[in-house]
Image: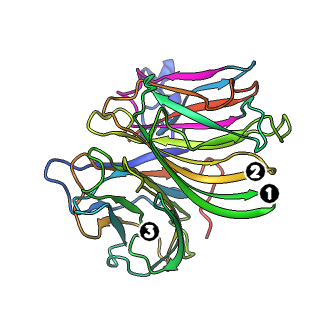
């Protein structure tokens, strides 16, 4: 049996979607992983993915440390960054191109504050393209039972996809704090 | 838990077609090894045929430990991936990296818009490193079989070297084509071969 199980997947249909939500997340895994291929309608190169965890509110109790490159230079910052879930293609980038990213969430059901690791690649047939590595802290001890991905300015376009996976404990495993 | 074993006894006069009868639904998992190639001799390229996977999987992942026969002063070689045999200049590549080179650390970016493969992933060559040093990484191809999207890849990698030129990176790649992926071919950019002992494993991920 695989150690990684699909919990839910969303494909955005015609007309787009304002958000993607994974709710009623089972508490039976050790770790979660969200894998996404997303694009926004925002008329820019990039739109930010905000996180709303346990329906507490967009970017509430969230902070980040990131390292990114935009094809021309690098930047590093620790901040209450709105792109806690990554940064995705906007409408000004190459057509048919969706950001390839993932959010890894260890110990999501434990009692410690929740740390996430985000890495994503925003491709574009130009010098500008974004590679982003980021740690995201959700400074809460509650178990995570829902996650909403919310583009800061636009909507997700048709064919955007996001899948939620759970990593199994195995026969002798247990969730740790 | 299973009690159908007892129920399936001849004396119980009950017959179950499946050992799963009476038990929780079986979840076969979502992350499956499709194939592993370990080179037994120096080889120019490795190709995975994924043409039969579209109905079962959504994403593909390649995990590798690889080394080139290139002998160069910086010890590196590029690991190039081509989709469906396309060697035209239809690929765009970006990366961010951190490095140690000639006694100094640093970081930077690069971009190229008309290359003939997915690249900006580097592995150890034979120059300046021992035969036991290999580069390693994980490549993710999302929505690999979609016909609505250009194909993208994200790679986290390390070239395996401790000297003279050590790099760790996140790479992003674009193939400007909406065709479903049917094959993935890996080769080196500057050298001639991937050396014996290089390993490539491809996984299918449901979604």
Q: Which residue lies furthest to the left in this view?
A: A15
Above or below residue B67? Residue B155 is below
Callout 1: helix, strand or loop?
loop
Q: Is residue B14 visible?
A: no
The nearer-to-camera label among 3 and 2 is 2
Give me the C-alpha separation between circle 3 and circle 1: 45 Å
Q: Is residue B48 magenta?
A: yes
Q: Are marks 3 and 2 on the same chain?
A: no
Of A151 and B34, which appears nearest the observer? A151
Q: How is the image coloured?
A: rainbow
Q: Residue furthest right?
A: B130
Q: Mark 2, chain letter?
A: B
Q: How many marks?
A: 3
Q: Can residue A2 be seen in this view?
A: yes
Q: Are marks 1 and 2 on the same chain?
A: yes
Mark 2 packing: few (<14 Cα in 10 Å), some, or many (20+)?
A: many
Residue at numbered disc 3: A144
Magenta residues?
A: B44-66
Above or below residue B104? Residue B176 is above
User: Could you tell me which residue is drawn at 41 percent across and 25 percent down?
Assistant: B53
Residue at numbered disc 2: B165
Q: In this view, does A119 lie to the left or right of A173?
A: left
Residue at numbered disc 1: B102
User: Could you tell me which residue is drawn at 35 percent across and 32 percent down?
Assistant: B145
Where residue A7 sits in the image (x, y, percent)? 40, 49
The reply to whether discs 1 and 2 touch (Cβ–Cβ < 8 Å) is yes
Where residue B77 sits in the image (x, y, percent)? 68, 37
Q: In which quarter of the image is the N terminus of chain A?
A: top right
């Amino acid at each position: 049996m695989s150690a990684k199980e699909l919990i839910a997947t969303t494909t955005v249909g015609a007309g787009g979607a304002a958000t993607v939500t994974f709710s009623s997340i089972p508490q039976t895994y050790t770790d979660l992983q969200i894998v996404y291929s997303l694009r926004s309608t925002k008329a820019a190169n990039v739109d930010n993915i905000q996180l709303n965890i346990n329906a507490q509110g967009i970017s509430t109790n969230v902070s980040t440390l990131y390292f990114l490159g935009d094809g021309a230079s690098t930047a590093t910052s620790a901040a209450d960054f709105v792109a806690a879930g990554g940064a995705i293609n906007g409408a000004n980038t190459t057509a048919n191109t969706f950001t390839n990213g993932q959010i890894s969430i260890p110990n999501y059901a434990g009692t410690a504050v929740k740390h996430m690791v985000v890495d994503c690649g925003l491709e574009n047939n130009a010098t500008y393209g974004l590679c982003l590595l980021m740690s995201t802290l959700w400074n809460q001890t509650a178990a995570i039972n829902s996650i909403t991905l919310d583009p800061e300015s636009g909507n997700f376009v048709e064919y955007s996809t996001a899948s939620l996976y759970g990593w199994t404990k195995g026969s002798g495993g247990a969730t740790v704090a | 838990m299973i009690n159908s074993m007892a129920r399936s006894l001849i004396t119980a006069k009950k017959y179950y077609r499946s050992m799963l009868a009476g038990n929780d639904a079986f979840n076969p998992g979502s992350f499956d090894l499709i194939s592993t190639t370990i080179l037994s001799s120096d080889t120019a390229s490795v190709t995975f045929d994924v043409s039969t996977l579209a109905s079962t999987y959504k994403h593909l992942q390649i995990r590798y430990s690889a080394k080139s026969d290139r002998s160069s002063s910086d010890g590196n070689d590029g690991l190039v991936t081509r989709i469906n045999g396309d060697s035209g200049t239809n690929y765009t590549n970006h990366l961010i990296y951190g490095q140690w080179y000639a006694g100094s650390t640093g970081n930077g970016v690069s971009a190229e818009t008309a290359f003939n493969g997915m690249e900006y992933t580097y592995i150890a060559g034979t120059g300046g490193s021992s035969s036991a040093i290999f580069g390693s990484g994980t490549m993710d191809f999302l929505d690999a079989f979609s016909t609505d999207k250009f194909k993208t890849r994200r790679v986290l990698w390390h070239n395996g070297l401790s000297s003279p030129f050590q790099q760790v990176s996140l790479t992003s790649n674009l193939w400007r084509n909406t065709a479903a992926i049917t094959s993935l071919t890996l080769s080196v950019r500057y050298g001639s071969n991937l050396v014996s002992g290089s390993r490539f494993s491809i996984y299918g991920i449901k979604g």
